[in-house]
Image (cartoon, rainbow, N blue to C red):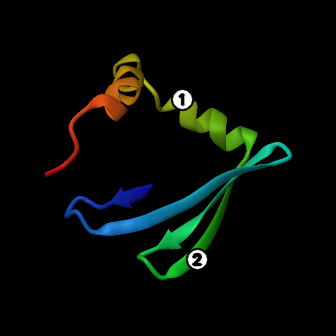
Amino acid sequence: MKLRGADGSELMNVASLQRDGDVLVIKGKVFGAMPLVARLDADAARDALKLLTPNLIWFLITLPFRKGRK
């Protein structure tokens, strides 16, 4: 999975999502070169869920079924 900036440049390439006990471990590379291991714990996950609105949840559910960028 690639996360892109507003100009379309690659910011992060996520290589894997893994569980390590009660933490989600995200592994990838930032800007195509610098390795990154990020850890998402329960507090951070709760903070992320607070950012979701009903419209955003619906958008995320339908996102995989939308046409890709040309």
Coordinates of residue 23 in the picture (x, y in percent) = 77, 47
Please determine whether, in this image, residue 43 is positioned above or below residue 25.
above
Question: Is 59 located above or below residue 16 in the figure?
Answer: above
38 shown above or below 23: below
From the top left corner, tell me how far across and down residue 13 is, in percent.
46, 65
- 13 and 50: which is toward the camera: 13
Q: Nearer the viewer, mark 1 or mark 2?
A: 2
Residue furthest to the top in view is: 54
Mark 2 burial class by Cα count in 10 Å: few <14, some 14-19, many 20+ = few
Is residue 64 found left or right of 22 in the rendered image?
left
Residue bearing the label numbered 1: 50
In the rendered image, residue 63, in percent from the top left (x then y), is placed at: 33, 32
Kind of residue indicated by mark 1: Lys
Crowd band around label 1 with a 10 angstrom C-alpha radius: few (<14), some (14–19), many (20+): few
Q: CA distance from mark 1 to mark 2?
A: 29 Å
Residue lying farthest to the bottom in this orientation:
33
Q: Is residue 7 left or right of residue 46?
A: left
Reading the image, the residue beneath label 2 is: 35
Which residue is at a point 41% across and 76% down the rendered structure image?
Answer: 31
Q: Earlier in the sequence, mark 1 or mark 2?
A: 2
